[in-house]
Image (tube, rainbow, N blue to C red):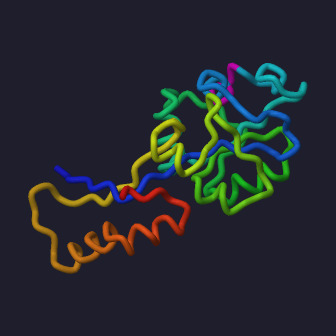
Amino acid sequence: SLDAVIIAIDGIVVIVHPDNPITDLTFGQLSDIYTGKIRNWKEAGGADSPIVVIGRDTASGTRNAFEELLGISGQCTYGQEKDSSGGIKIAVETTPEAIGYVSLEAAEANQKTKKISLEGVEPSKEKIYTGEYFLSRPLLMVTRKGEQLQPEAQSFLDYVLSDEGQEIIQSQNLIPIT
């Protein structure tokens, strides 16, 4: 069995094309968009146009966390699957009808897409840290349960959890745990 140490928190941010008038979605709307129950933006308060649903490939931890947090694992109907956050950002910034999701770090690094609030809560570091923004996941370092780490591995873990390590985490648009 394994032990897990939380080293940071990552937000999963929903993005749309900047011309999309949508600024906020509910939990239900987002779930319904990704499962194909809502197929047109007008059903979510937007323009009368079909939604292009974009997500990560099945090997993605972001996809797994996104689907699990929404309670829709294995039920999504993706129009496009991308193997990277960069692929999702490009698809969304070039497709006015698109919706996608990326980590907070990827969303902050791109001003060519628009971040969507969920349930009226914007995807900020503060709101992700407090849990008010519900799409977030812990980032972990995993070790074998009950086994003492090699000195080098323990030093690395200690460094990641130190003030300096947590400052690096914050500089990468992840949320430090301290």
Residue at image point 72% right, 60% down: 110
* 9 on left or right of 152: right
* 96 on left or right of 107: right
Given residues 22 and 149, the one toward you in this image is: 22
Residue at image point 81% right, 27% down: 41
Where, by quadrant of the figure, is residue 130 drawn? top left
Return the x and y of residue 168 as percentages of the image width and height. Answer: 46, 72
Specify the quadrant that holds the C terminus.
bottom left
Where, by quadrant of the figure, is residue 20 drawn? top right
Q: Range of the magenta residues?
A: 33-37
Q: Is residue 94 above or below residue 22?
A: below
Q: Is residue 17 among what the camera can see?
A: yes
Return the x and y of residue 74 as percentages of the image width and height. Answer: 51, 31
Q: Check if residue 175 falls in the magenta segment.
A: no
* 119 on left or right of 112: left
* 74 on left or right of 8: right
